[in-house]
Image (tube, rainbow, N blue to C red):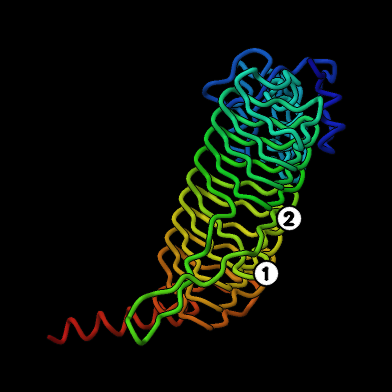
Amino acid sequence: MPSVREVARAIGARVLGDEHTEIRGIASIASATSGDLVFIEDEKRLQEALESRAAAVLTEKAPQLSAHKPLLIVARPRLAFARAAEILKPGSKNTEGRGIHPSVVVLPTAQVAETATVDPWTFVGDRAAIGHRTWIGAGCVIGEGVSIGEDCKIYPRVTIYPGTRIGNRAIVHAGAVLGSDGFGYVRDPENGRHVKFPQIGTLEIEDDVEIGANTAIDRGALEVTRIGRGTKIDNLVHIGHNCQIGENVILAAQVGFSGSVVVENNAVIGGQVGVGEHARIQEGVLLGGQAGVLPKKVLRGKGVAFWGTPAKPLREYLKSLAALAKLGRRE
Protein backbone atom coordinates (compact mmCIF):
# COMPACT_ATOMS: atom_id res chain seq x y z
CA MET A 1 0.00 0.00 0.00
CA PRO A 2 1.30 3.50 -0.76
CA SER A 3 2.12 5.86 2.08
CA VAL A 4 0.69 9.32 2.65
CA ARG A 5 4.02 10.69 1.46
CA GLU A 6 3.82 8.78 -1.85
CA VAL A 7 0.23 9.85 -2.50
CA ALA A 8 1.03 13.47 -1.63
CA ARG A 9 3.98 13.50 -3.99
CA ALA A 10 1.87 12.12 -6.83
CA ILE A 11 -0.89 14.72 -6.43
CA GLY A 12 1.29 17.69 -5.45
CA ALA A 13 0.08 18.00 -1.84
CA ARG A 14 1.87 19.15 1.31
CA VAL A 15 1.72 16.80 4.30
CA LEU A 16 1.03 17.74 7.89
CA GLY A 17 1.48 14.82 10.28
CA ASP A 18 2.72 11.27 9.87
CA GLU A 19 3.70 10.87 6.22
CA HIS A 20 4.42 7.16 6.69
CA THR A 21 0.76 6.29 7.31
CA GLU A 22 -0.40 3.74 4.72
CA ILE A 23 -3.39 4.46 2.48
CA ARG A 24 -5.47 1.54 1.21
CA GLY A 25 -8.28 3.24 -0.66
CA ILE A 26 -10.73 6.14 -0.88
CA ALA A 27 -14.13 6.72 0.70
CA SER A 28 -16.67 9.28 1.81
CA ILE A 29 -16.39 10.57 5.35
CA ALA A 30 -19.44 8.56 6.43
CA SER A 31 -18.26 5.26 4.94
CA ALA A 32 -14.52 5.57 5.63
CA THR A 33 -12.72 2.72 7.34
CA SER A 34 -9.17 2.36 8.57
CA GLY A 35 -6.75 3.01 5.71
CA ASP A 36 -9.05 5.21 3.63
CA LEU A 37 -8.39 8.70 2.29
CA VAL A 38 -11.23 11.26 2.43
CA PHE A 39 -11.52 14.88 1.30
CA ILE A 40 -13.32 18.04 2.39
CA GLU A 41 -14.07 21.27 0.54
CA ASP A 42 -15.91 22.93 3.42
CA GLU A 43 -13.73 23.74 6.45
CA LYS A 44 -16.76 23.18 8.66
CA ARG A 45 -16.49 19.45 7.89
CA LEU A 46 -12.86 19.15 8.98
CA GLN A 47 -13.74 18.06 12.51
CA GLU A 48 -16.16 15.46 11.13
CA ALA A 49 -13.41 14.11 8.87
CA LEU A 50 -10.91 14.01 11.74
CA GLU A 51 -13.36 12.09 13.91
CA SER A 52 -14.06 9.55 11.17
CA ARG A 53 -12.21 6.25 10.81
CA ALA A 54 -10.27 7.57 7.80
CA ALA A 55 -6.49 7.31 7.81
CA ALA A 56 -5.87 10.73 6.22
CA VAL A 57 -7.72 13.82 5.03
CA LEU A 58 -7.34 15.95 1.90
CA THR A 59 -8.09 19.61 2.61
CA GLU A 60 -7.37 23.03 1.15
CA LYS A 61 -6.21 24.85 4.28
CA ALA A 62 -4.17 23.78 7.26
CA PRO A 63 -6.11 23.99 10.54
CA GLN A 64 -4.96 26.30 13.32
CA LEU A 65 -4.82 23.41 15.79
CA SER A 66 -2.79 20.24 15.36
CA ALA A 67 -4.66 17.21 14.02
CA HIS A 68 -4.29 13.59 15.08
CA LYS A 69 -4.55 12.38 11.45
CA PRO A 70 -2.17 13.24 8.63
CA LEU A 71 -3.49 16.03 6.40
CA LEU A 72 -2.70 16.49 2.73
CA ILE A 73 -2.91 20.19 1.92
CA VAL A 74 -3.73 20.98 -1.70
CA ALA A 75 -5.40 23.83 -3.62
CA ARG A 76 -8.26 21.78 -5.11
CA PRO A 77 -9.16 18.88 -2.81
CA ARG A 78 -11.86 17.38 -5.05
CA LEU A 79 -9.54 17.31 -8.07
CA ALA A 80 -6.69 15.94 -5.97
CA PHE A 81 -9.02 13.26 -4.57
CA ALA A 82 -9.94 12.16 -8.10
CA ARG A 83 -6.24 11.89 -8.98
CA ALA A 84 -5.50 10.01 -5.79
CA ALA A 85 -8.28 7.56 -6.67
CA GLU A 86 -6.38 6.60 -9.83
CA ILE A 87 -3.34 5.77 -7.72
CA LEU A 88 -5.25 3.90 -5.04
CA LYS A 89 -7.72 1.91 -7.14
CA PRO A 90 -7.31 -1.86 -6.91
CA GLY A 91 -5.92 -3.79 -9.86
CA SER A 92 -8.50 -3.66 -12.65
CA LYS A 93 -9.27 -6.10 -15.41
CA ASN A 94 -7.41 -4.17 -18.04
CA THR A 95 -4.13 -4.57 -16.13
CA GLU A 96 -4.39 -8.23 -15.19
CA GLY A 97 -3.20 -9.56 -18.55
CA ARG A 98 -5.33 -12.73 -18.39
CA GLY A 99 -5.14 -13.26 -22.13
CA ILE A 100 -7.83 -14.44 -24.52
CA HIS A 101 -10.62 -16.69 -23.27
CA PRO A 102 -11.00 -19.95 -25.24
CA SER A 103 -14.53 -19.00 -26.35
CA VAL A 104 -13.32 -15.82 -28.09
CA VAL A 105 -13.24 -15.81 -31.91
CA VAL A 106 -10.20 -13.97 -33.24
CA LEU A 107 -9.91 -13.99 -37.02
CA PRO A 108 -6.47 -14.81 -38.45
CA THR A 109 -5.32 -11.31 -39.44
CA ALA A 110 -6.33 -9.64 -36.15
CA GLN A 111 -3.62 -8.56 -33.71
CA VAL A 112 -4.22 -8.77 -29.96
CA ALA A 113 -1.40 -7.62 -27.68
CA GLU A 114 0.00 -10.22 -25.30
CA THR A 115 -0.91 -8.08 -22.30
CA ALA A 116 -4.51 -7.51 -23.43
CA THR A 117 -7.49 -9.34 -21.91
CA VAL A 118 -10.44 -10.51 -24.00
CA ASP A 119 -13.37 -11.98 -22.05
CA PRO A 120 -15.71 -14.79 -23.19
CA TRP A 121 -17.97 -14.77 -26.25
CA THR A 122 -16.27 -11.84 -27.94
CA PHE A 123 -15.61 -11.57 -31.69
CA VAL A 124 -12.51 -9.85 -33.11
CA GLY A 125 -12.61 -9.28 -36.86
CA ASP A 126 -9.93 -9.36 -39.55
CA ARG A 127 -7.19 -6.73 -39.33
CA ALA A 128 -8.48 -5.49 -35.98
CA ALA A 129 -5.82 -4.41 -33.48
CA ILE A 130 -6.09 -4.36 -29.68
CA GLY A 131 -3.34 -2.62 -27.72
CA HIS A 132 -1.40 -3.49 -24.59
CA ARG A 133 -3.24 -3.77 -21.26
CA THR A 134 -6.60 -3.18 -22.89
CA TRP A 135 -9.55 -5.12 -21.53
CA ILE A 136 -12.43 -6.23 -23.79
CA GLY A 137 -15.50 -7.35 -21.81
CA ALA A 138 -17.72 -10.33 -22.52
CA GLY A 139 -19.87 -10.41 -25.63
CA CYS A 140 -18.27 -7.52 -27.50
CA VAL A 141 -18.09 -7.34 -31.30
CA ILE A 142 -14.91 -5.76 -32.67
CA GLY A 143 -15.36 -5.25 -36.38
CA GLU A 144 -12.98 -5.56 -39.29
CA GLY A 145 -10.09 -3.08 -39.23
CA VAL A 146 -11.00 -1.64 -35.82
CA SER A 147 -8.06 -0.19 -33.90
CA ILE A 148 -8.17 0.05 -30.09
CA GLY A 149 -5.21 1.61 -28.29
CA GLU A 150 -3.49 0.82 -25.02
CA ASP A 151 -4.96 0.79 -21.49
CA CYS A 152 -8.57 0.93 -22.71
CA LYS A 153 -11.63 -0.55 -20.98
CA ILE A 154 -14.36 -1.83 -23.28
CA TYR A 155 -17.23 -3.05 -21.13
CA PRO A 156 -19.50 -6.01 -22.08
CA ARG A 157 -21.67 -6.04 -25.18
CA VAL A 158 -20.12 -3.05 -26.88
CA THR A 159 -20.36 -3.16 -30.68
CA ILE A 160 -17.63 -1.42 -32.67
CA TYR A 161 -18.28 -1.22 -36.40
CA PRO A 162 -15.54 -1.79 -39.02
CA GLY A 163 -12.89 0.88 -39.45
CA THR A 164 -13.45 2.63 -36.11
CA ARG A 165 -10.30 3.91 -34.39
CA ILE A 166 -10.05 4.35 -30.62
CA GLY A 167 -7.05 5.96 -28.93
CA ASN A 168 -5.36 5.16 -25.63
CA ARG A 169 -6.97 5.04 -22.19
CA ALA A 170 -10.51 5.18 -23.57
CA ILE A 171 -13.44 3.83 -21.55
CA VAL A 172 -16.53 2.55 -23.36
CA HIS A 173 -19.42 1.41 -21.18
CA ALA A 174 -21.78 -1.49 -21.76
CA GLY A 175 -24.07 -1.52 -24.76
CA ALA A 176 -22.48 1.38 -26.63
CA VAL A 177 -22.53 1.21 -30.44
CA LEU A 178 -19.65 2.93 -32.20
CA GLY A 179 -19.39 3.59 -35.93
CA SER A 180 -22.91 2.64 -37.02
CA ASP A 181 -24.41 4.12 -40.21
CA GLY A 182 -25.62 7.70 -40.06
CA PHE A 183 -29.27 8.51 -40.63
CA GLY A 184 -28.98 9.92 -44.14
CA TYR A 185 -31.48 9.54 -47.00
CA VAL A 186 -32.29 11.24 -50.28
CA ARG A 187 -35.94 11.43 -51.28
CA ASP A 188 -36.87 10.33 -54.79
CA PRO A 189 -39.62 12.77 -55.86
CA GLU A 190 -40.89 10.39 -58.54
CA ASN A 191 -42.02 7.67 -56.16
CA GLY A 192 -41.64 9.28 -52.72
CA ARG A 193 -39.17 6.68 -51.56
CA HIS A 194 -36.13 7.48 -49.44
CA VAL A 195 -32.84 6.24 -50.89
CA LYS A 196 -30.05 5.62 -48.40
CA PHE A 197 -27.14 8.07 -48.82
CA PRO A 198 -23.73 6.32 -48.69
CA GLN A 199 -22.38 5.87 -45.16
CA ILE A 200 -18.79 4.89 -45.90
CA GLY A 201 -16.84 7.25 -43.63
CA THR A 202 -15.16 6.41 -40.34
CA LEU A 203 -15.24 7.19 -36.63
CA GLU A 204 -12.15 8.36 -34.74
CA ILE A 205 -12.10 8.55 -30.95
CA GLU A 206 -9.02 10.20 -29.47
CA ASP A 207 -7.16 9.50 -26.21
CA ASP A 208 -8.78 9.65 -22.75
CA VAL A 209 -12.38 9.70 -23.99
CA GLU A 210 -15.12 8.09 -21.88
CA ILE A 211 -18.37 6.96 -23.50
CA GLY A 212 -21.45 6.08 -21.45
CA ALA A 213 -23.68 3.03 -21.55
CA ASN A 214 -26.00 2.61 -24.56
CA THR A 215 -24.57 5.61 -26.35
CA ALA A 216 -24.51 5.53 -30.17
CA ILE A 217 -22.00 7.40 -32.31
CA ASP A 218 -22.35 7.27 -36.11
CA ARG A 219 -19.53 7.04 -38.59
CA GLY A 220 -19.08 9.83 -41.13
CA ALA A 221 -21.12 9.65 -44.31
CA LEU A 222 -18.18 10.19 -46.65
CA GLU A 223 -15.58 11.54 -44.24
CA VAL A 224 -14.94 11.27 -40.47
CA THR A 225 -16.88 11.66 -37.25
CA ARG A 226 -14.38 12.69 -34.57
CA ILE A 227 -14.48 12.75 -30.76
CA GLY A 228 -11.66 14.88 -29.34
CA ARG A 229 -9.18 14.04 -26.62
CA GLY A 230 -10.47 14.02 -23.05
CA THR A 231 -14.16 14.37 -23.95
CA LYS A 232 -16.61 12.71 -21.55
CA ILE A 233 -19.94 11.41 -22.87
CA ASP A 234 -22.74 10.28 -20.56
CA ASN A 235 -25.26 7.44 -21.05
CA LEU A 236 -27.88 7.37 -23.82
CA VAL A 237 -26.27 10.02 -26.01
CA HIS A 238 -26.61 10.03 -29.80
CA ILE A 239 -24.02 11.68 -32.04
CA GLY A 240 -24.89 11.78 -35.74
CA HIS A 241 -22.66 11.34 -38.78
CA ASN A 242 -19.89 13.84 -39.57
CA CYS A 243 -20.04 15.49 -36.13
CA GLN A 244 -16.82 17.06 -34.89
CA ILE A 245 -16.63 17.08 -31.09
CA GLY A 246 -13.65 18.98 -29.67
CA GLU A 247 -11.38 18.30 -26.72
CA ASN A 248 -12.50 18.15 -23.08
CA VAL A 249 -16.18 18.51 -23.98
CA ILE A 250 -18.84 17.33 -21.50
CA LEU A 251 -22.05 15.77 -22.88
CA ALA A 252 -24.70 14.85 -20.29
CA ALA A 253 -27.26 12.08 -20.67
CA GLN A 254 -29.74 11.94 -23.56
CA VAL A 255 -28.06 14.62 -25.65
CA GLY A 256 -28.91 14.26 -29.34
CA PHE A 257 -26.84 15.67 -32.21
CA SER A 258 -27.97 15.71 -35.84
CA GLY A 259 -25.40 15.32 -38.59
CA SER A 260 -22.42 17.63 -39.12
CA VAL A 261 -22.66 19.40 -35.76
CA VAL A 262 -19.45 21.04 -34.53
CA VAL A 263 -18.76 21.38 -30.81
CA GLU A 264 -15.56 23.22 -30.00
CA ASN A 265 -13.20 22.57 -27.07
CA ASN A 266 -14.35 22.79 -23.43
CA ALA A 267 -18.06 23.18 -24.19
CA VAL A 268 -20.52 21.78 -21.62
CA ILE A 269 -23.83 20.35 -22.90
CA GLY A 270 -26.58 19.61 -20.35
CA GLY A 271 -28.97 16.69 -20.34
CA GLN A 272 -31.54 16.20 -23.12
CA VAL A 273 -30.14 18.99 -25.28
CA GLY A 274 -31.04 18.67 -28.96
CA VAL A 275 -28.85 20.19 -31.68
CA GLY A 276 -29.88 20.55 -35.34
CA GLU A 277 -27.69 19.73 -38.32
CA HIS A 278 -24.71 21.93 -39.18
CA ALA A 279 -25.01 23.92 -35.94
CA ARG A 280 -21.82 25.08 -34.22
CA ILE A 281 -21.26 25.32 -30.47
CA GLN A 282 -18.18 27.46 -30.01
CA GLU A 283 -15.43 27.03 -27.41
CA GLY A 284 -16.46 27.14 -23.77
CA VAL A 285 -20.20 27.59 -24.36
CA LEU A 286 -22.53 26.17 -21.68
CA LEU A 287 -25.87 24.71 -22.80
CA GLY A 288 -28.51 24.13 -20.12
CA GLY A 289 -30.63 20.98 -19.91
CA GLN A 290 -33.34 20.48 -22.56
CA ALA A 291 -32.09 23.41 -24.62
CA GLY A 292 -32.70 23.26 -28.37
CA VAL A 293 -30.29 24.58 -31.00
CA LEU A 294 -31.72 25.22 -34.46
CA PRO A 295 -30.00 23.91 -37.61
CA LYS A 296 -27.02 26.01 -38.79
CA LYS A 297 -27.18 28.15 -35.66
CA VAL A 298 -23.89 29.35 -34.13
CA LEU A 299 -23.66 29.78 -30.35
CA ARG A 300 -20.66 31.83 -29.29
CA GLY A 301 -19.26 33.21 -26.07
CA LYS A 302 -16.74 31.43 -23.85
CA GLY A 303 -18.37 30.82 -20.47
CA VAL A 304 -21.76 32.08 -21.69
CA ALA A 305 -24.74 29.94 -20.63
CA PHE A 306 -27.59 29.30 -23.09
CA TRP A 307 -31.03 27.94 -22.26
CA GLY A 308 -34.39 27.26 -23.81
CA THR A 309 -35.66 26.45 -27.31
CA PRO A 310 -34.43 28.05 -29.43
CA ALA A 311 -31.41 28.43 -27.16
CA LYS A 312 -30.73 31.99 -25.97
CA PRO A 313 -28.23 33.53 -23.54
CA LEU A 314 -29.50 32.81 -20.04
CA ARG A 315 -30.27 36.42 -19.16
CA GLU A 316 -32.31 36.86 -22.34
CA TYR A 317 -34.10 33.57 -21.72
CA LEU A 318 -35.05 34.58 -18.17
CA LYS A 319 -36.39 37.92 -19.44
CA SER A 320 -38.59 36.02 -21.90
CA LEU A 321 -39.93 33.85 -19.11
CA ALA A 322 -40.69 36.92 -17.00
CA ALA A 323 -42.54 38.55 -19.91
CA LEU A 324 -44.63 35.42 -20.44
CA ALA A 325 -45.45 35.28 -16.76
CA LYS A 326 -46.72 38.88 -16.90
CA LEU A 327 -48.93 38.08 -19.89
CA GLY A 328 -50.41 35.17 -17.96
CA ARG A 329 -51.24 37.35 -14.99
CA ARG A 330 -53.04 39.88 -17.21
CA GLU A 331 -55.42 37.21 -18.42
Return the mark for residue 223.
1
From where the camera sits, is residue 62 visible? no
Placement of 63 over or under 188, stated as above or below? above
Which of disc 2 and disc 1 is earlier in sequence?
1
Placement of 131 over or under 94, stated as above or below? below
In this rendering, position of residue 267 left or right of residue 167: left
Q: CA distance from mark 1 to mark 2?
A: 19 Å
Q: Quadrant of the N terminus?
A: top right
Which residue occupies 60% across, 27% down? 47
- Give whichever of 33, 125 is nearer the camera: 125
Which residue occupies 74% across, 18% down? 23
Q: Position of residue 131 (x, y in %)?
A: 79, 36
Crowding at label 1, few (<14), some or many (≥20) Cα neighbours within 10 Å?
some
Q: Amino acid at mark 2?
A: Arg
Closer to the eye: label 1 or 2: 1
From where the camera sits, is residue 124 visible? yes
Placement of 114 over or under 303, stated as above or below? above
Residue that numbered label 2 is attached to: 229
Which residue occupies 64% across, 70% down? 222
Q: Amino acid at mark 1?
A: Glu
Residue 118: quarter of image = top right
Q: Are marks 1 and 2 in contact (CB under 8 Å)?
A: no
Residue 63: quarter of image = top right
- Looking at the rendered structure, the secondary structure element under dot 1 is loop
What is the number of callouts on the image? 2
Q: Quadrant of the C terminus?
A: bottom left
- Give whichever of 21, 130 is nearer the camera: 130
Which residue occupies 59% across, 77% down? 280
Return the mark for residue 111.
none
Q: Position of residue 133 (x, y in %)?
A: 77, 30
